[in-house]
Image: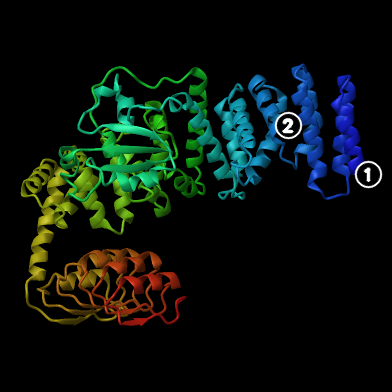
Amino acid sequence: MDSEKKIYKYKKVLSNPSRLEVVLKEIRTLVDMALTSPLQDESIHQAPLEIVSKLLSENNNLTTQEHENIIVALAPLLENNHPPPDLCEFFCKHCRERPRSMVVIEVFTPVVQRILKHNMDFGKCPRLRLFTQEYILALNELNAGMEVVKKFIHSMHGPTGQCPHPRVLPNLVAVCLAAIYSCYEEFINSRDNSPSLKEIRNGCQQPCDRKPNLPLRLLHTSPDLVSQEATLTESRLKSVIVTSNEIHVEVERNNTANQKMTANVGNDSEPNLIDCLMVSPTCSTMSIELSAQADRILGCYVEILKMLSDYDDWRPALASLLQPIPFPKEALAHEKFTKELKYVIQRFAEDPRQEVHSCLLSVRAGKDGWFQLYSPGGVACDDDGELFASMVHILMGSCYKTKKFLLSLAENKLGPCMLLALRGNQTMVEILCLMLEYNIIDNKDTQLQIISTLESTDVGKKMYEQLCDRQRELKELQRKGGPTRLTLPSKSTDADLARLLSSGSFGNLENLSLAFTNVTSACAEHLIKLPSLKQLNLWSTQFGDAGLRLLSEHLTMLQVLNLCETPVTDAGLLALSSMKSLCSLNMNSTKLTADTYEDLKAKLPNLKEVDVRYTEAW
């Protein structure tokens, strides 16, 4: 009760301030009272902050120096308490008006550090986010500029390889996204009948300059769009709603346009967002021009995203946060923004961890990802395909649906792939060879064009010759004849298996036992060439997820598979769902989980014998 009485007394005194000296003295006393109170009540600490916040909002005639004195008086209380909304607004104003003030470094730094470490939701406290944003901009105004910001980011991460505060990264990203969004508000607010990303980037003088066969109408987000979608499909001009973050792009197309869009991908395919944006408008001189202040803000916060991507432990979470492309379309149409952000995407493309580089792909089917944006023809691509080649290289190394990925490239990016292969890019040469090897390309003329492309460079010619050799060996291997059952001696290796299979014809081989050998996932490339294989025993081998993924794509007729005591995990076992002929599956003593087991049972209708002993699903 004493504390409440004192707070009431101070509130009354400070509501009618006379001289600043008296006000400062009362504030210091109020802060001391809150800090020394034995009560563990948050309201005791928040009350002084709210009282001073009200004092500042009602007295606009205070000088800057008087502002600083009040902030310094409050400093001890701010060490363990978030400032209330009105006080945040006052701090923001101070950061904008006096960015070089020592108060910013000495008082605001620990406050912002606490916000970044402990805030759980900026949506509930938007002014905390705005204060953090203005504080970082104030740091950028100092003489050392981005070096000071870089040191601050490093202080938030900590000196070790692992940041001990899980909330720091999401909070920093939230601040960056909000700041970048604010740079384009002028353009966002005038979105009605605005042109597409491609048109903004290239310039479009009038809406009528757009191609008539594929008109685009950019709509503001509306809750009614979901209900409208059902009725739109029944209309004479079929419409497709494609969501891209906060916008919806409604694509109206007539039959001619529909045929053009689906020429390469089949009649049941719908154009994705980037395909829609690839309309070729009549270009003029329109472009996005940011104000000097917005340009500084953009530069600062894109640079912070680049800094965040340099930390190995933060990169997986950062990639996941940026995977949905959480930027306004105006930012994606702004060449300076996409050019600077390219560094971040390159870092994702260079990271060998699948959890990072898989975020280059879209977050769900029908929605585009960074891979599409930075591919040749994408609105953000500003090079000759170097980043595209890097992304393809890393994705091919971990993509278990290799054939599906190659099919997607053949349908959407065959031209860029052939151009880069023509220039000697080894990754693209490998891609073209795989397309031929897996029979991805049906059209004979296209096949001949790919072969001509490969033979035009030394690296392409060499790889194509190797492919031809493998194909001849494959035909010999698959020629009918040879044993129907084969068992390799224990301790045999991948090389032993390859040597054995290359020694004769195994077109009749139906049952292969590699149990207790030393084979690994590397032998999968030889196993997939056995056309009649129905039973495969891999008991107690080092055959892992990568090999399992490859088998699932090629050996769809396999009926019996023994994976007992192999290092396979859910990541590889889930791929087995495409092997519909499986009737017997042994996963004894693997890292199978209960959820994956239930998923496999649901997707494998012919499965009759299953062994899951000594697994989580047992």
**Considering depth in this image, is 260 or 101 the residue closer to the camera?**
260
Relative to residue 349, is residue 61 depicted above or below?
above
Residue appearing at x 12%, y 42% in the figure: 453
Judge from the rendering whether residue 575 lies leftward or rightward of residue 554; answer left or right: right
What is the crowding at mark 1: few (fewer than 14 residues within 10 Å), some, or many (at least 20)?
A: few
Vertical side of 171 occupied by 67: above or below: above
In depth, the one of 504 and 412 nearer the eye is 412
Tell me the kind of residue under disc 2.
Val
Q: Quadrant of residue 243?
A: top left
Pointer 2 residue = 107
In the rendered image, residue 483, in percent from the top left (x then y), is placed at 12, 81
- Of marks 2 and 1, which one's residue comes earlier in the chain? 1
Disc 1: which residue: 2
Residue at 20% from the left image edge and 47% from the top image edge: 411
State the residue in front, 27 or 554.
Answer: 27
User: What residue is at 50 percent from the left and 36 percent from the top?
Assistant: 177
Residue at the (28%, 65%) spot, across then down: 522
Q: Is 464 placed above or below 257 here? A: below
Residue 542 visible in the snapshot: no
Q: Which mark is residue 177?
A: none
Mark closer to the observer (2, 1): 1
> Amino acid under label 1?
Asp
Work out whether residue 85 or residue 134 is closer to the camera in this orientation and state it. 85
Q: How far apart are marks 2 and 1 (CA)?
A: 30 Å
Query: Dot 2: what SS?
Result: helix
Where's residue 136, x and y in %?
A: 60, 30
